[in-house]
Image: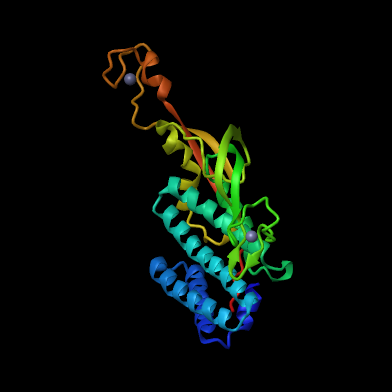
Amino acid sequence: VIRYFVENNHIQEVYDVLLVLNKIKKLLIDCKKINVTELREFLDKKYEIIHRIAVELNDEQLANATYVTKKYSNLLLKISSYLKTIKDKEYQSSWVILQDCLDLTFWIGKYTKIDNRLEIPSLIKLFSCYESLYPYKIFVSSELIVTKSRCSICGASWNSLDCTHIKGNLVWGKVVTEEILDAEFSAIAIVPHPIDKRCIIEIDEKDQEYSFNKIDLFTGQNLYPFTMFTISSKKSFKRREDIKIVGVNSPCSCGSGLKFKKCCKKKLYQEHLTLLATPTETVNFLFF
Ligand SMILES: [Zn+2]
Ligand SMILES: [Zn+2]
C-alpha cells in the first residue's frame, strides 16, 4: 500500500511527504533530536490535501495508501518519542509508548505486502528486545460481551445485512471497525500474553527502583538504539564499603547499640545486578 503512495510522487504533496519521511529516518539513524509536534502537524496537513486530491481523482487506492502512510509516519515519530522517554529515564510511561509502537508496526505490516514491508519486520524484532528489559510479565485483561454495535463506515447495525463492509478493510482512507455502543462486562483475568499489554499489574513502589534496574543498566550502556540485542544478566554480591567491620560481639559501628552480628553484619553484602547487552543485527532503514 505504501508503494502505491510512493508511485504517486508526481503529486507535489506526496513528494513533500516522502522528503520529510526521509528526513525523519535520517534523524533517527543519527540519533538527532526530532520535533515531533511540528512534524506531525506539517504531515497531517499534507495528508489531508492528498486525501482530497484522491477523492477528486476518484482514486480510492490512493486514499487508502495515504491512510497507511500516515500511520507509518506516526510510527517513525513514536519511535523518536520512545527513545527520548527512556533516555529521560521515564520507564513507566515508556512502556505504553513501546506498546503503541508495536501496535502500529503490526497494523502497518498487515496492510503491506510481504516483499515490501520496509523495516517493519525488523522493527518488531527490535521492540521485542526492548520489551524484554521491562519487569512486566503478567497483565490484566477484561472480557466484554458486546450487546450493541455498529459499522464505523455506514453506521448500520453490525449484525445486520444492511452493512456489507468487512472488518479491517480500508474504505476511502478509513478502516472498517465495529463500534461498540453497549457491552456487558463479563470477566477479568490475569494473563501472560494479552493483545493489549497496557494494563499492567503495578509493582510495589518500594520495589520499583529495583525492577527497572535492567532497562536502566541497558540505557547506561549507550548501545546504538536501532540494533537488536541479547541480554545476559548476572546477580552477584558486593561488599558494602560503608560498613565498618568490628568483632561479631562488639557493639555495631552504626550506633544502634546492638551487637555487630545482630546488626549490620547481616547487610554486609549487597545484591548487585550486572547486565551485558550484546548487539546482533541492526535495523536497516530504507529511503524513498
Ligand atoms: Zn457498513
Ligand atoms: Zn549496625
Q: Residue at x 42, y 20 (%)?
A: 266
Q: Nearer the viewer, residue 184 or 75?
A: 184
The image position of residue 135, as x and y in percent, is 52, 39
Residue 138 seen in the current view: no
Task: Name the residue furthest bottom.
Answer: 10
The image position of residue 15, as x and y in percent, is 53, 83
Asked if residue 135 is positioned above or below residue 44 in the image, the reply reads above
Q: Residue at x 50, y 74 (%)?
A: 26
Q: Nearer the viewer, residue 29 or 154?
A: 154
Residue 209, quarter of the rendered image: top left
Left or right: where does residue 4 sit relative to residue 213? right
Q: How many marks?
A: 0
The image position of residue 280, as x and y in percent, is 63, 58
Residue 261 seen in the current view: yes
Q: Give the quarter the ligand 2 occupies.
A: top left
Q: Residue at x 36, y 11 (%)?
A: 249
Left or right: where does residue 62 sit relative to residue 134? right
Q: How is the image coloured?
A: rainbow
Asked if residue 132 is positioned above or below residue 259 in the image, the reply reads below
Asked if residue 69 is positioned above or below residue 234 in the image, the reply reads below
The image position of residue 70, as x and y in percent, is 53, 69
Is the C terminus in the top left, top right, bottom left or bottom right quadrant?
A: bottom right
Residue 38, quarter of the rendered image: bottom left
Q: Nearer the viewer, residue 167 or 109?
A: 167
Is the N terminus in the top left, top right, bottom left or bottom right quadrant?
A: bottom right
Q: Nearer the viewer, residue 207 or 101?
A: 101
